[in-house]
Amino acid sequence: MKKLLLGCLGVLLFACSPVSNSGTVTTLRIFDYSPDAAAFWVEIIPLFELEYPDIEIVHESVTPDVFFQLKSAKIAGQSVDIISGQPQDDLFTKANRDLFLPLSGEDFLANFYPDLVQQGVVDGEIYLVPTSMETVLVFYNKEIFAEHDLSIPRTWSEFLSCLEVLEAAGHIPILFGGQQQWPVAMHIIALETAIVRSANPDFYSQVRMGESAHNDPEWVEVFEKLSVLKDYYQQFSLGQDYDQIPSLFASGTGAMIIDGSWQAGAITKAQPIFDVGVFALPGTDDVDANGVVSTKMGNGFMVLKDSPNHEAALKFLEFFSRPEIYQLYANATGRLPSQRSAEITDSVLLEILRTINDEKYRQVMVWENLVIPGARYDFDALGIAVVSGDLSGIEAANRMQQNILDTKDDWEEIELP
């Protein structure tokens, strides 16, 4: 039935679209880091090329680690037209921002959540088409929790009690894949949201003005509590491949993982032998302070300014943004959608949506999108140093603050929405 529907969609698109008689074919090169969306590209490239026979798509998708190794070379070599990106990585410095084409005024942007589109705005210009939304939560094994009469913890003390019960019962309380280092960021994000922003919503704007600092008590607490969490990881967690965590969790090996919403699809594909639940990590003993979750644009598509194929790139982005096409993308990736009209059937994603939309939570921006452009943070490396025991919480916080101050000459002023 699915193939039949896609076939009808292709005929409809073809019937309603003009065909170029120029005789020339434009090669549109797209580079991203979503191998999990392979099924989407197999389906939609023929549909797009049917509608636009004068455009040929060459799509390449690699894992995130490989993507970031190749990204600069692809851009410098002008061997890409559309590329994946994120606001904090690609827009917060002028040198990076100048590589991309502003998309302001494009009608297809209206199909996406306005708040997500706004996250791709710098100095009044839109640069990103949001392909997904992300949040960081605790995924937990409902069967193990029920077996030990554990309820969702609402405070840090209750969370620690859960960890103790699980460990005493012989379970791995938290699975962590630290081999690639960057996954520690999710644990930092989960802790920061309740500890820092609930205490001081203006913390990050105050850092630039010298009124707050990353070695203030709140950020020291973030690193100190990360040091507590590490004692409940599996053995040799720093050598564990991050990509193996969903299947380990799905097999019942560990009781919880602290991770991004993008792992929902991987968990589902691993066919868990239990029902999966989610909750926001309670970073403090104040229930009200814990009533917050951080969300952001997962990633987005950007058009290279030096690309000779702007017209073809904009045609593709318009095509991708159509609700019926974007629905196929949402189905293939298993991520939180960036369009309100997209329907979700994945049970884990539905759990996430119910949680972040629960009235007891309010949503705030992920702190990574609030950093000072040009400043050096190194929070991933510092977090790993805390997990390995090489740095204490206060040492990590002091190091991060010093890194920020040492790079003050590189700070940039940008206008964010």
Image (cartoon, rainbow, N blue to C red):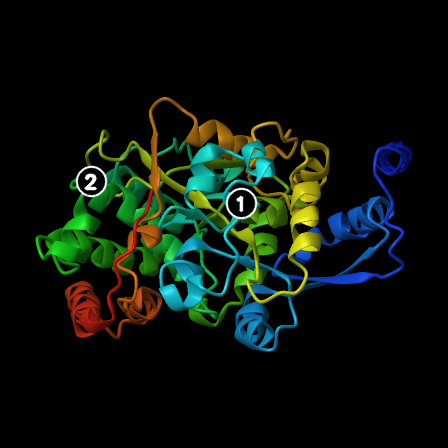
Asked if the residues shown at circle 2 and circle 1 are in contact, with their CB atoms under 8 angstroms apart, the answer is no
Q: Quadrant of the C terminus?
A: top left
For mark 2, give the secondary structure.
loop
Which amino acid type is shown beneath numbered disc 2? Pro
Q: Where 15 falls versus 303 (above or below)?
A: above
Left or right of 5, for residue 80: left
Q: Where 99 falls versus 295 (above or below)?
A: below
What numbered label is drawn on residue 130?
Answer: 1
**Residue 415 location (% of width, % of height):** 30, 50
**Residue 231 location (% of width, % of height):** 32, 60
Q: Residue sitting at 43 percent across and 70 percent down?
A: 238
- Identity of the residue furthest to the left in this view: 211
What numbered label is drawn on residue 1?
Answer: none
Residue 271 visible in image: no
Q: Residue sitting at 29 percent across and 69 percent down?
A: 382
> What crowding class fits label 2: few (fewer than 14 Cα within 10 Å), some (14-19), or many (20 or more)?
few
Which amino acid type is shown beneath numbered disc 1? Pro
Q: Quadrant of residue 115?
A: top left
What numbered label is drawn on residue 201?
Answer: 2
Q: Residue sitting at 57 percent across and 44 percent down?
A: 264
For mark 1, give the secondary structure.
strand
Looking at the rendered image, the disc whose residue lies closer to the viewer, 2 or 1, is 1
**Residue 201 location (% of width, % of height):** 20, 40
Q: Where 327 falls versus 300 (above or below)?
A: above
Q: Quadrant of the N terminus?
A: top right
Question: Nearer the N terminus, badge 2 or badge 1?
Answer: 1
The Cα–Cα distance between marks 2 and 1, rounded to whole angstroms, is 25 Å
Give whichever of 175, 383 is nearer the camera: 383
> What crowding class fits label 1: few (fewer than 14 Cα within 10 Å), some (14-19), or many (20 or more)?
many
